[in-house]
Amino acid sequence: MTRGGYRRVLLKLSGEVLMGDAAFGIEPKTINRLANELVEVRRAGVELAIVIGGGNIFRGMNGTASGMDRASADYMGMLATVMNAIALQDAIERLGEQVRVISALHIREVAEPYIRRRAIRHLEKGRILIFAAGTGNPYFTTDTAASLRAMEIQAEVVLKGTKVDGIYTADPKTHKDARRYESLTFTEALSKRLGVMDATAMSLCRDNGMPIVVFDVTKTGEIRRVVSGEPVGTIVREESNG
């Protein structure tokens, strides 16, 4: 089975992607490159929604490891995603494209509250959506938020942009013989514990027939290629290519 182009997608971006070569925060060169690619995809007619993480600013699990209450640390992580969303919104708007930040936490001065029908209407009007603050609940990752939002807006696929060009049998940085999968079933990905997304997010996609494509978002032009249906990265779906 070959992949076709997609009409409506949910792109999951980790906060770490925004760091570029920096050790912390947001690198202007990187966020501007991403904004240009996202605008190019939108102007090609793709309805585009984004869920963004906050690990470049604050990661809830790290806070928990240092002794913080888990819920408090997770809320801080959600606020970090709002900061990233506003920065990405600014970069996209400077290119002349309409974009809306929609937050699961109510911060009306800087973001719209999440209302499913309004979000879909924004997509239909050609606006880029950036979902911030995860699900709005502690103990849930932004991977789970991406899966949930993809279902709610009726996306055709979850695109997970990482720093690796797909899913491997082992960490390619430490195992030179690691092999990249072109495709996997959800059952295979979960049973082999390949770390595609957390188990909650994976199970949600599996149970609702939502495919996931894992690809290298740091490589210029890859977002356009994966949205166009080119064989980029690794696709995870219930039916294997054999």
Image (spheres, rainbow, N blue to C red):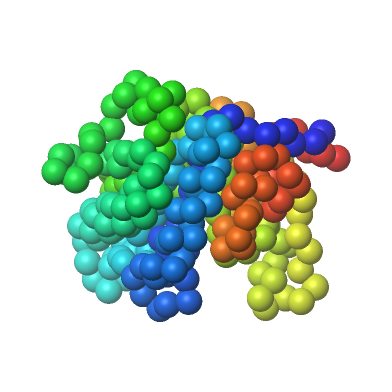
Left or right: where 210 falls relative to 54: right
From the viewer's side, name the closer residue of 11 and 170: 11
Residue at the farthest right position: 242
Q: Residue at x 36, y 74 (%)?
A: 24
Instruction: Give the percent coordinates (x, y) of residue 232.
Output: 71, 51
Determine whether, in the image, residue 138 is placed left or right of residue 108.
Answer: right
Relative height, residue 212 to residue 151 (above, below): below
Q: Residue at x 55, y 42 (%)?
A: 41
Can residue 46 be seen here? The reply is yes
Examine the rendered structure and indicate whether residue 168 appears above or below residue 154: below
Residue at x 48% of width, y 76% of height: 21
Q: Quadrant of residue 103?
A: top left
Which quadrant does the C terminus fall into?
A: top right
Q: Quadrant of residue 101?
A: top left
Residue 144 position within the rendered picture, expressed as x and y whole percent measured from the top left: 44, 43
Residue 201 on image: x %, y %: 50, 43
Q: Depth check: 99 or 185 in front?
A: 99
**Numbered marks: total:** 0
User: How far across and how far down the image is residue 228, in percent?
Assistant: 67, 40
**Residue 61 vs residue 159, the one in the foreground:** 159
Q: Is residue 150 left or right of residue 24?
A: right
Q: Residue furthest front?
A: 96
Image quadrant where residue 187 sits: top right
Q: What residue do we see at 62% from left, 41% from top?
A: 227
Q: Is residue 191 visible?
A: no
Q: Extreme left residue here? A: 109
Frontmost residue, 140 versus 183: 183
The N terminus lies in quadrant: top right
